[in-house]
Amino acid sequence: MDRITKAARLMIVDHHDPENMSLLRFNALWESNYRHDSLLVFSTGRSPTLYKQLRKEKPMLTPDITIMSVGTEITYGSSMLPDDGWVKILNQKWDRNVVIEETSKFPELTLQAETEQRPHKVSFYVDKTEAQVVMKELSSRLEKRGLDVKLIYSGGMDLDVLPQGAGKGQALSYLLNKLKTEGTLPVNTLACGDSGNDAELFSIPDVYGVMVSNAQEELLQWHAENAKGNPNIIHAKERCAAGIIEAIGHFNLGSNTSPRDVADFVECKLDHVNPGYEVVKFYLFYERWRRGEAANCETYIASLKASCDPTATFVFPTGVEKTLHECIYAMKGCYGDQKGKQFRVWVDRVLSTPTGSNTWLVKFDKWELSGDERCCCVTTAKINAKGSGGASDGYTWVSVQQKWLEGYEKKDTSIWLF
């Protein structure tokens, strides 16, 4: 949160996406165009345990804020620092022991795994044919016990019992009020969802909303009954994270052209470029080269060399140092070596800091997926603007230094090129 000292240009409240390519397209768009001045919020019904497991399985970016356990937990940054103020709010008229006692009287309810039981969330499975009757009776019993609770049914089987003040919508409302108090209310906020527990996100005033094309039945039903005529909420034609990209364009919130949708970086000229875009472009080209998806021609190699200072150095995670030109030359021999294989490259947490009028220090995590192996390097690069025209003329790489992210070291480092 500290990296943005003024109102964010855009805040996106995202959800879980099962499709890797949609995620990779969104990742490239976010890191190249939005990370430097916008906020990414990941909102999920999952507990911290399942959320962390999901991050190990999917090419997910690191959000600035994470809302978990159906809006009952809010954390900040990669270290996931909890919001104590939110905890105090949820403690009002809530007694978890009473909830456990009353729900035990319903044979229709089956407790979910222990990992999904949280301080302010008790979760069950219940057949959808019995859900409405159970919810009505349970709500009545808990009210008589002096509790003020909320029951959320989603996915055709999941029932969550939460404090009345909890939920994805209330958590988002709390965050927006907090940012407003701090004088950093985002210029625009876009909420994205696909399940019933996302409906609350679309009820917050002045928030744009997108239901992705693969949204579940209960969310579509909510939209038909409550927001069909609302121009600020759309049902996207695209699935998953691709629906978010579609919504950014629909509401004119900024660029919605992902670098992954650009066929030729040499020919592509942009009006507004930044160091983040340069980093995304470089590693996306590297992925395409290894997959044999870029043309094997000297034009591309010459373009890469031209983007590097002749004396530019690259320090590998092993400590070995070479010139960037040597690395580019070595890359020529690896053209298409990952063709037809599961090989993807993406960058996360791209943060550029000006160190001079035309010089930036860029820090980011470089991820590489090869088969079942996921590797990551914490990377620091020095980049200069080309010529006298500033960043509009492009950038020159001056140095790159990498070190392994603990737990994600590569087993065979002989072909770790960048």
Image (spheres, grey):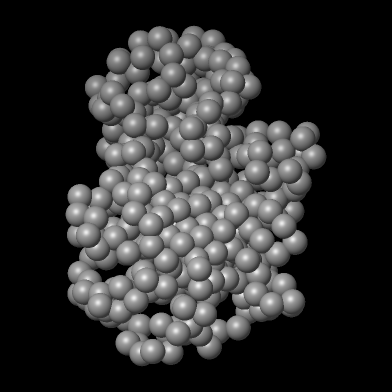
- Compared with residue 356, is residue 268 higher up or lower down, i.e. above or below? below
Residue 183, percent from left and from top:
80, 39
- Residue 113 location, quadrant: top left
Of residue 280 and residue 187, the one placed in the foreground of this image is 280
Image label count = 0
**Taking the image as drawn, is residue 198 in sight?**
no
For the point 47% across and 46% down, which residue is it?
Answer: 62
Q: Nearer the viewer, residue 116 or 374?
A: 374
Say whether residue 47 is left or right of residue 371. Answer: right
Which residue occupies 65% across, 43% down?
3
Instruction: Return the residue nearer the eye: 176 or 409.
Output: 409
Image vertical order of residue 121 relative to residue 94, above or below: below
* Above or below: residue 139 compared with residue 188: above
Is residue 295 in view from this perspective? yes
Give the quadrant of the N terminus: top right
Q: Is residue 286 left or right of residue 201?
A: left
Locate residue 130 relative to residue 5 in the image: left or right: left
Which residue occupies the foreground of this view, 315 or 368? Answer: 315
Left or right, residue 127 beside residue 39: left
Q: Percent from the top left, x then y, of residue 217?
A: 40, 54
Q: Which quadrant of the rendered structure holds the C terminus?
A: bottom left
Q: Position of residue 71 (x, y in %)?
A: 51, 34
Residue 9 percent across, percent down from the top left = 70, 56
Task: Give the residue drawn at x 78%, y 34%.
Answer: 181
Answer with the quarter of the image where residue 215 lies. bottom left
Q: Residue at x 29, y 39 (%)?
A: 407
Above or below, 356 relative to 256? above
